[in-house]
């Protein structure tokens, strides 16, 4: 887990917008290839995530970030909301950083896997009703064997407009904002399981 924190601490030192985006993409890849999520006795082998980062000190403003207190200084803990499951990666009051889990394989007690292809479906599969997230142990845990698959990137799902770096409006089509990451070859996933799969590219 120290390796994630080291990468987070390197990220918050960066003030150049393009370098921040590159660091966010690298952080997504590192997490997808090296960690799984364990929550309420469920294991999720994450396949698709989106990253959200807001750091006014670095001049990087993400208007799609919820900006809840729970998304600051809450490293490796849950932030649950109406759109899904976030894992917080901030260990400071100075910035917000979290990943939304968009899809993955839920591993059952009998070792059977079921692919959940949307943040709400995944939420319903692993989060009990009236869940108390404060009593959860750390959420991300290292894989015994890291994945060596490629990671593909796309614009975050459903994002139409964002404001980045000193209030400059950035269109959804900007390739620099490919902050949705998928582990593995998207060509192998049926369209019904991965909306917008044709928009993914390998960087």
Image (tube, rainbow, N blue to C red):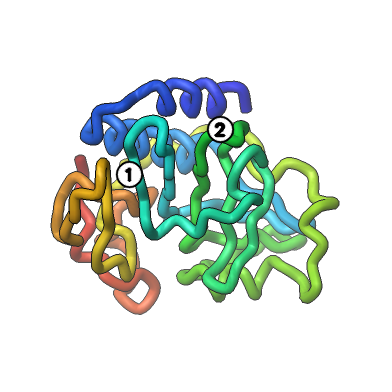
Residue sitting nearer the eye, 194 or 148: 194
Q: Which residue is mark 2?
A: 145
Locate the C terminus and report the quarter of the image it occupies: top left
Locate the N terminus and report the quarter of the image it occupies: top right
Q: N-terminal of the two: label 2 or label 1?
A: 2
The residue sitting at 57% across, 37% down in the picture is 90
> Where is residue 125 shown, x and y percent of the image?
65, 72
Residue sitting nearer the eye, 96 or 38: 96
Secondary element at image label 1? strand
Q: Which residue is mark 1?
A: 151
Quadrant of residue 81 within the rendered picture: bottom right
Q: Residue furthest bottom?
A: 192
> Where is residue 71 shown, x and y percent of the image?
59, 48
Quadrant of residue 133 within the rendered picture: bottom right
Name above or below for residue 30 compared with residue 105: above
Closer to viewer: mark 2 or mark 1 = 1
Secondary element at image label 2? loop
Residue 135 disc label: none
Left or right of 70 in this view: 119: left
């Amino acid at each position: 887990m120290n390796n994630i924190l080291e990468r987070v601490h390197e990220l918050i030192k960066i003030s150049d917008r393009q370098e921040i985006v590159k660091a966010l993409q690298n952080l997504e890849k590192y997490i997808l290839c090296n960690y799984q999520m364990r929550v309420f006795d469920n294991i999720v082998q994450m396949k698709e995530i989106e990253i959200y980062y807001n750091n006014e000190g670095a001049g990087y403003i993400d208007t799609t970030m919820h900006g809840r207190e729970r998304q600051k200084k809450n490293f490796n803990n849950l932030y649950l909301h109406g759109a899904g499951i976030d894992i917080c990666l901030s260990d400071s009051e100075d910035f917000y950083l979290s990943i939304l889990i968009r899809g993955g394989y839920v591993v059952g007690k009998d070792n059977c896997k079921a692919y959940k292809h949307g943040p709400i479906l995944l939420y319903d599969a692993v989060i009990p009703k009236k869940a108390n997230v404060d009593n959860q142990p750390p959420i991300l845990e290292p894989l015994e064997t890291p994945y060596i698959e490629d990671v593909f990137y796309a614009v975050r799902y459903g994002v139409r407009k964002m404001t980045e770096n000193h209030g400059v409006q950035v269109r959804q089509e900007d390739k620099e904002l490919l902050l949705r990451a998928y582990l593995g070859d998207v060509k192998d996933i049926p369209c019904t399981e991965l909306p917008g799969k044709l928009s993914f590219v390998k960087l």
